[in-house]
Amino acid sequence: MDTTELRIDTAGRHVLDLTDRAAAFAARAGGDGLLCVFVPHATAGLAVMETGSGSEEDLEEVMGRLLPRDDRWAHRHGSRGHGADHLLPVFASPSLTVPVQAGRLLLGTWQRICLVDLNDDNPQRRVRLSFLSGR
């Protein structure tokens, strides 16, 4: 299994497109297999979604309605509403798997791999990419 770790600064951004970096890693690994993407954080997740059409803002808006930034949460350390950040991985899983054929991600036409991070308390994130060869 080939693996690498990306270091991502999310400061001021809540949805970051990782597709080009994931595709470059899969291309270097080559062949057929599975690309596993994992975020080792309790307050971030991953999504496969369309980008560039307003979907990022729509996702932020719906997450704001589902997980308001107020003091209703039992988990209360950090900034106001930080407890909501700890529920994000329930909606945006910390892992996903994408099939790869001949070093190419088999995503649909508009699908992109995105890091979702609403937690402004910790903008330094890690994303692990692992390629499991089908050989």
Image: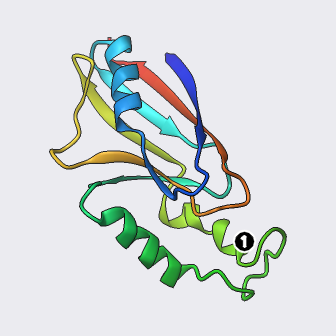
User: Residue 100 falls in which quadrant of the image?
Assistant: top left
Q: Position of residue 115 (x, y in %)?
A: 48, 49
Q: How many marks?
A: 1
Determine the residue positioned at 31% across, 17% down.
27
Determine the residue positioned at 48% across, 60% down.
92
- Would you say 73 lies left or right of 77 here? left
Whether residue 34 is situated above or below residue 48 in the rendered picture: above
Whether residue 30 is situated above or below residue 104 in the rendered picture: above
Residues 33 and 89: in front is 89
Q: Position of residue 118 (x, y in %)?
A: 58, 63
Pick out the residue farthest to the bottom: 72
Residues 1 and 6: in front is 6
Whether residue 14 is situated above or below residue 81 in the rendered picture: above
Determine the residue positioned at 43% across, 78% down.
62
- Would you say 1 lies left or right of 71 here? left
Q: State how the image is colored.
A: rainbow
Pick out the residue farthest to the right: 77
Pick out the residue farthest to the front: 12
Of helix, strand and loop, which one carries label 1?
A: helix
Q: Position of residue 87 (x, y in %)?
A: 62, 69
Q: Quadrant of the C terminus?
A: top left
Query: Pointer 1: residues within 10 angstroms few (<14), some, or many (20+)?
Result: many
Given the image, on which type of amino acid does mark 1 rest? His
Determine the residue positioned at 38% across, 13% down.
29
Residues 50 and 52: in front is 52
User: Residue 43 falls in which quadrant of the image?
Assistant: bottom right
- Would you say 101 lies left or right of 28 here? left
Q: Position of residue 61 (x, y in %)?
A: 43, 77
Q: Which residue is mark 1?
A: 82
